[in-house]
Amino acid sequence: MPGCGRTIQPLGSLSRFVAHSSRPYPRGSRPMSEYQYYEFFAVDEYLDDQQQAELRALSTRAEITATSFVNEYHFGSFGGNPATMVERYFDAFLYIANWGTHQLTLRIPEQLLDLDLAERYCCSDVASVRRHSDNLILDLHSENEEGDWDESDEIRLGELIPARTDLVGGDHRALYLAWLLAAQTDLDLDHLEPPIPPGLATLTGPLRALADFLRIDEDLLAVAAQSSAQPSEPDIDLAAFVKRLPQKEKDALLVRAVTGDPHVAAEVRRRYRRQFADAPETGSRTVGDLLDAAEARQAERQRQAARLAAEKRERRKREQAEERERRIDEVAAAGEKAWRQVDALIETKRQDNYDAAVALLSDLKSANARTGDTKKFTERVERLREAHRRKPSLQERFDHAGL
């Protein structure tokens, strides 16, 4: 495939993973970060005491439990090798740095995800897959050096773990999101789209979080979803599929589940999807097609937003004009009472009341202009200015309002 060979990027490359350089993680050169966040999670099996002790030797400050390892740095960096930690202990790893790096690594049992299939989606520098022992390791990178950074806005690993669960169960939308990451970053324009999984237009919360974490362009995702079929009713169809399984096979699955096999549910869902769910449509669009369509959609969306904003401004102007006309009608009807209100506001010597007095005078001026008798209004304003000549801030307001 153009722009996407069979070479798998090595996840364990020291230049990308080990925190021993001026910019320890990921690739590239940059000054030491003011904030780095490392989070690992074990999904399929708990960490025993020996494993936790081995992890503690890597960091005395990390929060370590039977399922997780979390550490953050405001100065300095983690001295361990995340690639090795994923290979030996954890099923998921998330990394965030305030220079704009997002990293997600997932370890998937090889019997639950076909390597050839995964390579069709993860075949670039930013989205890669490799085999290690009996697992496949997916490595996803997103870089963004623009804009302000807010730690409180960042997604954490708990929001993304369910996307891994769906992936091992045969839902390949996470793989397609990884391919979109590559498409908007470093794939050739003539690279052909992989199979399009159903349900791209209705992402689950975890998949939506994954798209946000990887910074998938919203217009690119929207045009990609146009060719994605609607998903079937999985719970109803899955129940029928399980009911048709031979009793002996169901008994074996039940025993495995009761004895703690973490992959039973994923295996059943994967088998169901392969046998009964509709096969994903083979993609017929190129990266260039999708990027062009996304650009066109963005332009149209911006045109629509500009049109709506212009309509809102015009509506607001009409409302303001109508409100002013109503206000002038009220002032004209008030007559001398409005002039007495002006005097009362000025006598308070408060700046906000000066503003209110000048606004009322402006309405009186407009009301007077309707009758064409501006001479009397001008004379009264001159007398008013003379009476309050020792109030410079009020005089400035008169000048600014053209009084």
Image (tube, rainbow, N blue to C red):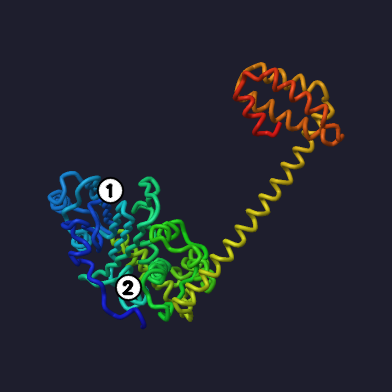
Front-lying residue, 103 or 85 = 103
**Residue that carries the numbered disc 1 in the rendered image:** 35
Whether residue 397 sits left or right of residue 272 in the image: it is right
Quadrant of image for the C terminus: top right
Which quarter of the picture shows residue 81?
bottom left
**Labels 1 & 2 near each other (Cβ < 8 A):** no
Q: Is label 2 in a helix, a strand or a loop?
A: loop
Residue 235 in percent (x, y) is at 48, 63
The amino acid sitting under disc 1 is Tyr
Measure the C-alpha gap from mark 1 to mark 2.
27 Å
- Measuring 75% from the left and 32% from the top, which residue is drawn there? 363
Residue 258 in percent (x, y) is at 31, 59
Quadrant of image for the N terminus: bottom left
Q: Residues within 10 Å of mark 2 (few under 14, many from 20)?
A: many
Residue 259 in percent (x, y) is at 27, 59
Q: Residues within 10 Å of mark 1 (few under 14, many from 20)?
A: some
Q: Is label 1 in a helix, a strand or a loop?
A: loop
- Measuring 70% from the left and 46% from the top, which residue is drawn there? 317
**Residue that carries the numbered disc 2 in the rendered image:** 124
The amino acid sitting under disc 2 is Ser
Q: Is residue 172 visible?
A: no
Identify the mark nearer the N-term, 1 or 2: 1
Front-lying residue, 217 or 174 = 217
Q: 113 above or below 258?
A: below
Q: 1 above or below 46?
A: below
Which quarter of the picture shows residue 322?
top right
Q: Is residue 348 visible?
A: yes
Q: Which mark is residue 218?
A: none
Whether residue 44 sits left or right of residue 173 in the image: it is left
Q: Tell me the mark number nearer the camera, choosing from 1 and 2.
A: 1
- Measuring 77% from the left and 32% from the top, which residue is drawn there? 365
Residue 288 in percent (x, y) is at 46, 77
